[in-house]
Amino acid sequence: MTTPQPGILAPLPHAARYLSFSLYAASAAPRALKDLCAVADGDSLVVGIGASLVSALGKEIPGLKPFPSWSHLGVDIPSTPHALWCWLRDDDRGELVNRSRQITHLLEQAFDPAGSADAFSYGSGRDLTGFEDGTENPTGADADRAAIFHGQGAGLDGSSFVAVQQWRHDMERFEAMDPETQDKVIGRHKAGNEEMDDAPPSAHVKRTAQEEFAPEAFVLRRSMPWSDQHSAGLMFVAFGRSFAAFEAQLHRMVGLDDGIVDSLFRFTHPLDGAYFWCPPMADGRLDLRALGL
């Protein structure tokens, strides 16, 4: 019996590191992936596989595709696909550093490092703006239904898709807004986290109200703040049983539905964007049979 990688449904850790890799030696990829399976427990290390790697292995995962690139009404959504993605989860940043080195070494026979970002928990699950993040996240059985494949057959059941975007905030621009304007940008009152009755159509909660799409567009968000010595923002991570719900929300945020752009773009924008397939677990190891491994 296959199960999801447990880190997908688990509570967020105190610290995380995201690693992405490009493929340079397709012939060595099967061996490198098998080595990765030896250390990937699906909990402290969640693994995602990109469309280019699946194609290089001569396989197909139904529904897996490159991230879309959109430019509309002054908003640019970049697509930066990668072959492999690793989400390292721990409460000890030292462990993240050492395990990152181990994983990079295991993969070096076939993959080059393509990106890295460190993230952390802030307060009770808040974005750096001070607003709570993921308020409408599904929980329990609803989270499982939103994020995990069921009834797709051996090698697919228990797997998930994930959309990953690193958003960079202009905190000075946000902090220059008065508190009422900040609330209207998000569509919630920062104090108390209550949704505003009179939120404008451009408010983020109005643009992404999951239950108002047809069909409903529920995703399981596992986002965390990130920072380095120069910048900071939100590492947006959303799991789903398809990319349709995520794309419906992003489509509306950019204004492609009705010409109304999400107010978030007043102070933040995505630096990248990639899709991955997160294989299931079987007997405590990644189940890569869908890839012929």
Image (cartoon, grey):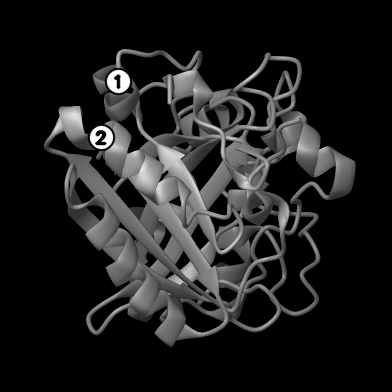
Q: Secondary structure at mark 1?
A: loop
Lower sequence index among marks 1 and 2: 2
Q: Where, by quadrant of the figure, is residue 54 drawn?
A: top left
Assess whether mark 2 and mark 1 are in contact (beta carbons under 8 angstroms). yes
Above or below, comparing residue 102 to residue 245 in the picture: below
How many labels were placed on the picture? 2
| Left or right relative to 213: residue 256 | left
Q: Can the viewer see residue 151 in this picture? A: yes
133 vs 83, nearest the viewer: 83
Q: Where, by quadrant of the figure, is residue 102 drawn?
A: bottom left
Q: Can the viewer see residue 271 in this picture? A: no
Q: Locate the C terminus and report the quarter of the image it occupies.
A: top left
Mark 2 neighbour density, 10 Å: few (under 14) some (14–19) many (20 or more)? many
Mark 1 neighbour density, 10 Å: few (under 14) some (14–19) many (20 or more)? some
- Give the residue drawn at x 65%, y 67%: 12
Check disc 2 and give the amino acid type. Answer: Ala
283 vs 64, nearest the viewer: 283
| Left or right relative to 32: residue 243 | right
Q: Which mark is residue 105?
A: none
Q: Where, by quadrant of the figure, is residue 70 drawn?
A: top left
Q: Position of residue 253 (x, y in %)?
A: 49, 39
Q: Position of residue 33 (x, y in %)?
A: 36, 40
Q: What residue is pinned by disc 2?
A: 29
Q: What residue is pinned by disc 1?
A: 57
Q: Position of residue 15 (x, y in %)?
A: 52, 77
Above or below, comparing residue 244 to residue 59 in the picture: below
Q: CA distance from mark 1 to mark 2?
A: 8 Å
Q: Position of residue 111 (x, y in %)?
A: 19, 45
- Give the residue drawn at x 36%, y 48%: 35
Check disc 1 and give the amino acid type. Answer: Leu
Q: Secondary structure at mark 2?
A: helix
